[in-house]
Amino acid sequence: MSSTATDKPIEPPVCAGPDLNTKKPNFTLPPGATDCHAHVFGPSAKYGYAPDRFYSPPQVFLQDYLNMLAVLGIERAVLVQSMIHGTNNGVIVDAIAESQGRLRGVALIGENVTDAELERLAASGIRGFRANLVAGIGVQFAAAKKLAERVKELGWHLQYLLDIENFPDLDRVLADFPVEVVIDHMGRPDTRRGVNAPGFQALIRLLRSGRGWSKLSAPYRTSTGAFPYTDITPFAHALVAAAPERLLWGTDWPHVTLDSPMPNDGDLCSQLAVWVPDARTRKQILVDNPQRLYGFR
């Protein structure tokens, strides 16, 4: 049937919600532990939804997220702006303002963002901006580098979501970037190719160079199995062995667009003890590294 001018636009599908019955992790997190990757959403009536979004958010909000953190024993967090609200970063700016110093943010910005807006975001607790090269959301590679020049004086970093095997020379490409770069989700490694694959080795070289960071997060995005995602463990071990001082950890709550069974955030947190058995190194990843990168006090 053909559409007419009176037809309502088709709404993108609503994502499945997270498991709100959060389990306690199987180890005690250190004081100051930080979730460095999560998304929160606000009401459409207040913040608006991006018309070009390809999903709609589950009906969970900031308080649901904070409740989950309380069960895990996490004191601080970094909110990453999702494509749901586009470049209107109001939902994370407002959350940071209400958090009494517990939260920081990573924004979505456009090429035409004004200096005044960048300064406003920085003053509000934003510490970087994101480019999603997997879904083509936000500024892409060349534009991101130009924006990085503009945010250098603000002390920001650039966060990339990418498939690492598409960038076998990533360390060379990013060597002259004006700001440090964070690679989401361990670079979304191709588990079939193993830790010696060219792109993953480029990621390791980038971290060792002192110019890059990576997040131990979202194993379900590229694992070929269910929890505990054992095919991802060798990649986590390789990163920890190479550069623990350049690693962060995140829940990726609320696990949007996930088709496989929804993980429990307590299980995901417990998995960190498998990836990082040494408690001192876990503290470095959970507390010390986020404090350096995001400016927690």
Image (cartoon, rainbow, N blue to C red):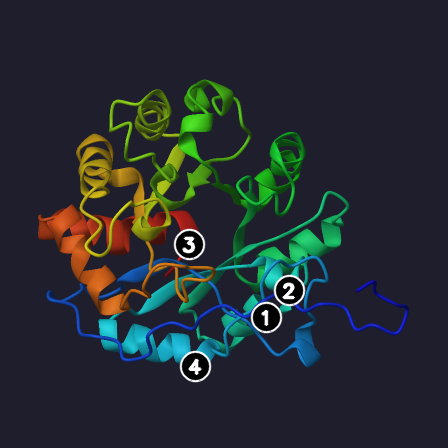
Q: Would you call the spot at circle 4 few (<14 residues within 10 Å), some (14-19), or many (20 or more)? A: few
**Residue, disc 4:** 63
N-terminal label among 4 and 2: 4
- Callout 2: helix, strand or loop? helix
- For the residues labelled 4 and 2, say whether their Cβ atoms are less than 8 Å apart: no
* Residue displayed at 40% across by 62% down: 255
Residue 254 lies, with reference to residue 295, above or below; the image says below
The residue carrying mark 3 is: 295
In this rendering, the label closer to the viewer, 2 or 3: 2
> Is any atom of residue 140 visible in this view?
yes
Amino acid carrying mark 3 in the image = Gly
Q: Amino acid at mark 2?
A: His
Instruction: Select label 3 or label 4 by which is in front.
Output: 4
Q: Which residue is mark 1?
A: 91
Q: Residue furthest right?
A: 5
Identify the image quadrant of residue 188: top left
Looking at the image, residue 285 lies above or below residue 236: below
Dot label at residue 48: none
**Kind of residue at disc 4:** Gln
150 or 266: nearer the viewer: 266
Circle 2 residue: 85
